[in-house]
Image: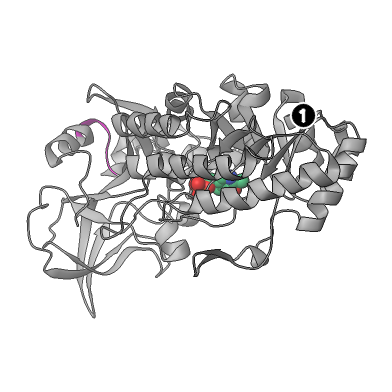
Amino acid sequence: MSKKPFVTLEQVKEIAKKYPTPFYLYDEKGIRENAKKVKEAFAWNKGFREYFAVKATPNPFIIDILRDYGCGVDCSSEAELYIAEKMGCTGTDIMFSSNCTPAREYRYAHKLGAIINLDDFTDIEALDQICGIPERICCRYNPGGEFRISNSIMDNPGQAKYGFTHEQMIEGYKILKEKGAKEFGIHAFLASNTVTNDYYPTLARELFELAVELKEKTGAKISFINLSGGVGVPYTPDQEPNDITVIGENVRKVYEEVLVPAGMDDIAIYTEMGRFMLAPYGALVSKVVHQKHTHKEYIGLDACASNLMRPMMYGAYHHITVLGKEDQPCDHLYDVTGSLCENSDKFAVDRMLPKMDYDDYVFIHDSGAHGFSMGYNYNGRLWSAELLLQDDQTVKMIRRPETIQDYLATFDFTDIFQPKESDLIHGIGDKEQNE
Ligand SMILES: *Cc1c(COP(=O)(O)O)cnc(C)c1O
């Protein structure tokens, strides 16, 4: 029933001597153990590959760890393709799953030899005009309606902007074939942050049946099926985590039930997980810098929604551990806030926590995916550092904190913000800012 931080108060105090709070901390050991489990869960499938969704944690040091387990990258923008290129990813290491895609991004993806995953029927003609249809191509499917597992509604594809309809898939594969495509993939992302072992197997059945139908109706050679992301993590302590071993095994059963009898036993399974690969293995670490007793009890942190936006954006729950007070009773009711001039800048509302004091360190759990990367600069609040707690328990900085000069870098066409000697004395962009 409780969530355990992957560091102790003593470790964080030591880290904070060198790297002032707030900072993101990632757990290399946890990332590796999980990536290994994912690989093993799908080892029954010869072509299996996880394409890590770069947007979840766009840090080359993190992505490099995942590449040790055979992971490729899933990109959806020019910047993400650039990260992939600089990291030495080429060709089928890259899945380009974009939507509303500018021509130059298709051109770039094509130049890198990435697997292009088309989001819309009209993209077929567009891509043909821009760079021609490659031999290997993928289309994203959206069946519409509601996505259900047993009787519960998991998500609402009918309201989602992504993908081809069923008819468009059939028509699209025919056209792509005429235009010279030889190998096809099918992709779908129908529910987000699912905390049930049934999501992938249910989705797989739908896509496998579609693959059989597409083969029959269009003669297209389906070479891979991309189950995309959506495998979730238990953000609240009462949720049961997904078991990737069970998920892999149940996808295998559906594969043997649907694809093997249709003679389609050479199809590779791809995934594009972000959250499942990283969320539990990253935390935002912050310090209590303010306490306020008005109509409610407020705890103010040195981090804010610029560092972690999910609570503000979705009302998302992120568990908070007050380091060193793990065993104390949660008998105080607090709102835990940042400093933005936005009342929604709260990491927790009406949360029962141990009695908190100035300089307490808090560990905000499950921030390793869609955490840092979703940050923004409202109020001129700056991005924090990202740190890696390595296998040997030493800490390595994998992104430095943003400075005021970084924030103002897009004014470099004028000299208004050119730093002067006197600025540096006042600590612009250096550590003293954090004090
Ligand atoms: C965001 C995204 C993912 C990753 O989703 P998670 O919820 O992090 O698993 C995968 N594929 C596509 C196309 C996405 O947009």
Q: Does any atom of ligand 1 lie closer than 8 Å to the CB of label 1?
A: no
Q: Residue at x 71, y 44 (%)?
A: 211
Q: Nearer the viewer, residue 351 or 165?
A: 165
Q: Main secondary structure of the magenta part?
A: loop
Image coords of residue 242 (percent x, y) = 37, 49
Please give the range of residues in magenta. Answer: 17-21
Image coords of residue 61 (percent x, y) = 44, 26
Please indicate, yes or no, whether residue 210 appears anywhere in the rendered image.
yes
**Quadrant of residue 270 within the rendered picture:** top right
**Quadrant of residue 352 within the rendered picture:** bottom left
74 relative position to 112: left or right = left
Regarding mark 1 in the picture, which secondary structure is present there?
Answer: helix
Is residue 320 on the magenta stretch? no
Q: Residue furthest top?
A: 88
Colouring convention used in this rendered image of the protein: one colour
Q: To which residue does mark 1 refer? A: 110
Image coords of residue 256 (percent x, y) = 56, 40
Image coords of residue 347 (percent x, y) = 33, 61
Is residue 18 on the magenta stretch? yes
